[in-house]
Image (cartoon, rainbow, N blue to C red):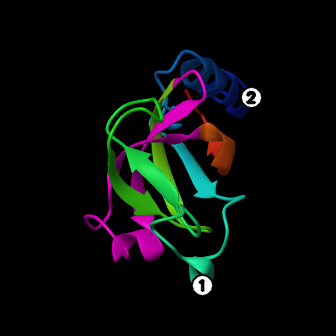
Amino acid sequence: MTRLTSGIAAAVLVAAGLGSAPQALAGDCTGRVSGVRPISSYDHRTGAGFLAVRRGPSSATRQIGEVYAGDLLSVYDRRGNWYHVTCMEGDCEDPLWGPASPSGWVSARYVRARGVCP
């Protein structure tokens, strides 16, 4: 096979999903918490300085954790204006309230998502 022919064959295999180029999946979405006050203004009673992680995609569901401005999240799902996330790195690994590296639902309004997102 000539160099041109093998290059075309490789491009066809990659385009068909059979080559070695990795395919992006819905789990390849990350986000940074933004638009919330810095952790230095933290007050759990008033809701300042954190983004609540909730059991379900609604502010009516129970808060189960917190993430903070600048934290990196893995985004798995979206329902309306809510993302299902897990803390990947940042202050959420050692939070002021709740479990370390929480997983649950957060308002999408406060997450700058990138990648192949739901």
Task: Specify whether 85 is left or right of 49.
Answer: left
Pick whichever of labels 1 and 2 is earlier in the sequence: 2
Spatial separation of the CA atoms under disc 1 and disc 2: 59 Å
Disc 1 crowd, CA 10 A, few/some/many (<14, 14-19, 20+): few
Q: Secondary structure at mark 2?
A: helix
Which residue lies most toward the bottom here?
40
Image point (60%, 34%), residue name: 116
Q: Indicate the quadrant where residue 37 lies.
A: bottom right
Q: Classify the position of the C terminus by image quarter.
A: top right
In the foreground, 3 or 89 = 89
Q: Can residue 19 be found in the magenta stretch?
A: no
Task: Evaluate whether residue 112 shows in this view.
Answer: no
Task: Evaluate whether residue 68 shows in this view.
Answer: yes
Residue 65 placement (x, y as % from top left):
34, 57
Q: Classify the position of the N terminus by image quarter.
A: top right
Residue 46 placement (x, y as % from top left):
54, 63
Disc 2 crowd, CA 10 A, few/some/many (<14, 14-19, 20+): few
Disc 1 marks which residue?
40
Task: Give above or below for 100 relative to 16.
Answer: below
Task: Give above or below for 5 relative to 33.
Answer: above
Image point (58%, 70%), residue name: 49
Disc 2 marks which residue?
4
| Identity, as a three-letter code, of the amino acid under mark 2 | Leu
Q: Indicate the quadrant where residue 93 lies.
A: bottom left
Q: Secondary structure at mark 1?
A: helix
Q: Can residue 80 be found in the magenta stretch?
A: yes
| Circle 1 or circle 2, nearest the eye | 1
Range of magenta residues: 79-107
Task: Specify whether 83 is left or right of 55.
Answer: right
| Identity, as a three-letter code, of the amino acid under mark 1 | Ser
Residue 110 placement (x, y as % from top left):
65, 49
